[in-house]
Amino acid sequence: LYKDETIVAHNKSENVLDKWILSRLNELIKNGTNSLEKFQVFESARPIRDFVNDFSTWYVRRSRERFKSEDQNEKGDALGTTLFVLKELSKYMAPFAPFFAEQVYQQIKVEGDVESVHLCDWPEAGEVDLEIIESMKKVREVVTSALEIRQKSGHKVRQPLAKLSIPENLSQNLLDIIADEVNVKKVVVGGSEVKLDTELTEDLKKEGIARDIIRAIQDARKKENLNPNDAIKIVMCTDKKEIVDEYMVMIKSPTGVTEISYTGDKQVYPVEVEGSTSFSVIK
């Protein structure tokens, strides 16, 4: 979806997510190589599953907005790192899953690369930053705890909340990841446990409705088989016009909407918010 022929694979990004997944990759290659040298095939194959899970459910998901960022440096780091990881991972997986590794390699190889992944050299492990691996583990544990509190309080993830307090002393870029993942306005370090402020102000409620509308538009784009780069216009029937107008920029930015107009007639796609909101897509 976000392939860019101008971006090349690299492992030089300073972004904390990129540095983390590269350290995880190096850890996989280093430990797996050591196991293979001892003829421990299962011990070198099994960690692939955990790495792919980290890569898919955390790195790629957390990097989606970076993949389509208007900041070319940010986009280049995210896509370049992803390419690098996929290429090195395909080399590592080649002895264990030869056909899948070849399929991945064929989709990402560029001019000058060897014809097949099975003609590549075995990947070499770079530096393993154990500190960043441990810090990201703490981040994910905090996120899990906070989301459990959210679920018990009855607040869906799309509803922004005011504050999350955590006991872990983490760097600001990691706190930003937590804030975005849990959908809170700020994360503060203090206390002995994870604590979530679940009180909703009117502004938080309105932003929650705007986020519901964004999610509904994204779902509609999928049903309309639109590509990420396709711009659209929206015709909306809603009693939440003042909220849509207030959060117009926020709604337009991730959805590819260039124009929103209003009508009194019910439209194609309903949105589950307080009151009634529905809309149609004009390609």
Image (tube, grey):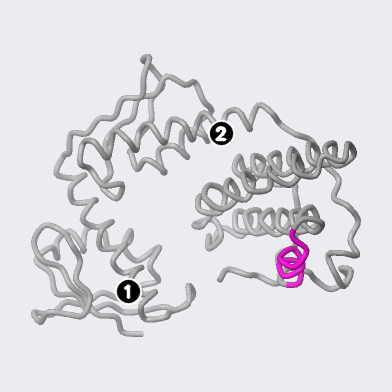
Which quarter of the picture shows residue 202? top left
Q: Which residue is more in the foreground, 247 or 116? A: 116
Q: CA distance from mark 2 to mark 1?
A: 34 Å
- Residue 5 horizontal/vertical position (percent): 70, 72
Q: Amino acid at mark 1?
A: Ala
Compared to 51, does 170 lie above or below? above
Q: What quarter of the picture does the C terminus occupy? A: bottom left
Residue in the image at 89% along x and 61% along y: 120
Which SS does the magenta portion mostly show? helix
For label 1, the SS is helix
Which quarter of the picture shows residue 24? top right
The part of the chain drawn in magenta is 97-106
In the rendered image, the residue lying farthest to the top is 192
Q: Which residue is more in the foreground, 138 or 45? A: 45
Q: Do the residues under discs 2 and 1 have CB atoms within 8 angstroms?
A: no
Q: Which mark is residue 106?
A: none
Q: Residues within 10 Å of mark 2 (few under 14, many from 20)?
A: some
Q: Amino acid at mark 2?
A: Met
Mark 1 highlights which residue?
Answer: 220
- Residue 159 horizontal/vertical position (percent): 26, 47
Mark 2 highlights which residue?
Answer: 136
First in sequence, mark 2 or 1: give its number: 2
Residue in the image at 35% along x and 72% along y: 257
Q: What quarter of the picture does the N terminus occupy? A: bottom right
Residue in the image at 24% along x and 80% along y: 280
Q: Is residue 104 magenta?
A: yes
Q: Which residue is more in the foreground, 18 or 55? A: 55
Q: How many marks?
A: 2
